[in-house]
Amino acid sequence: MRAGIHSINRLLATDTINLPQGIIEVIPSRTAPALRLKDENGQAFDLTQQRGKWLFVHFWASWCGPCAREIPTIQILNNQLTHPAFRIVLINTAETEDTVFSFLSTTAPQLHSLLDEDGQVSEAWSPRGLPSTYFVDPQGVIRYLALGGRPWDSAAYQTFIKALLNQTPQTIKP
């Protein structure tokens, strides 16, 4: 009996994630909408081909002040948190390829952004303002949301993301 209690406690400990300021658990969780776009280099991206990874899906625009302040912290996060089961997916909402390329080349040259030039993907995801970041689990389900700019290079946010990556499929709630 005692061993059973310890097993339950271990399961509960791995299932609990401390949410840093501004991260909201999406309840009820929902399957991520379709996401098929090209980046500013013409490379195609399809969300369905990313199963098995945690995705950091980030909606932004160059004219958005909080986005402009946040993008460099995302580049730092990208540089510091290299894990095969984690991918950052930037989605620029309704700007031209030239605008996105120009902005990223001076602000975060190592990042690439998908282009939602007609706004259809953004409409399907329905971010409640910019920037908005969704955390999509390895099964393609939206689990967490961050509204507004966040210091993604800070310890609290990196610890949160590492905790997501440490979850096993059995500990991810359906």
Image (tube, grey):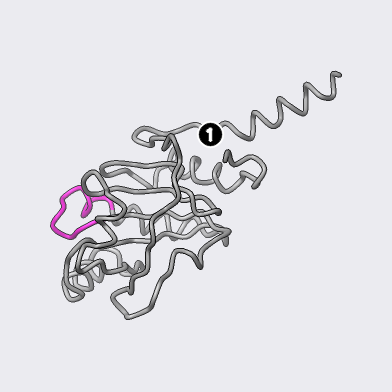
Label 1 is placed on what type of residue? Ile
Vertical order, 116 against 164 (above or below): below
- Name the residue tied to disc 1: 17
Look at 43% across and 69% down and name the residue there: 46
Vertical order, 19 against 76 (above or below): above
- Residue 62: image quadrant is bottom left
Residue 135's x, y, as percent?
A: 43, 48
Residue 169's x, y, as percent?
A: 64, 47
Q: Residue most toward the left?
A: 63
Residue 161's x, y, as percent?
A: 49, 45
- Residue 172: image quadrant is top right
Q: Is residue 99 left or right of residue 16?
A: left
Give the crowd class for mark 1: few <14, some 14-19, many >=20 residues within 10 Å: some
Q: Which quarter shows the N terminus?
A: top right
Look at 32% across and 79% down and name the residue there: 41
Q: How many marks?
A: 1
Vertical order, 48 against 142 (above or below): below
Foreground of the two, 51 or 82: 51
Q: Is residue 174 left or right of residue 30?
A: right
Q: Which quarter shows the C terminus?
A: top right
In the image, the segment drawn in magenta is 60-70
Look at 41% across and 71% down and name the residue there: 45
Look at 61% across and 45% down and name the residue there: 166
- Residue 83: image quadrant is bottom right
Residue 129's x, y, as percent?
A: 21, 46
Q: Is residue 166 left or right of residue 8?
A: left
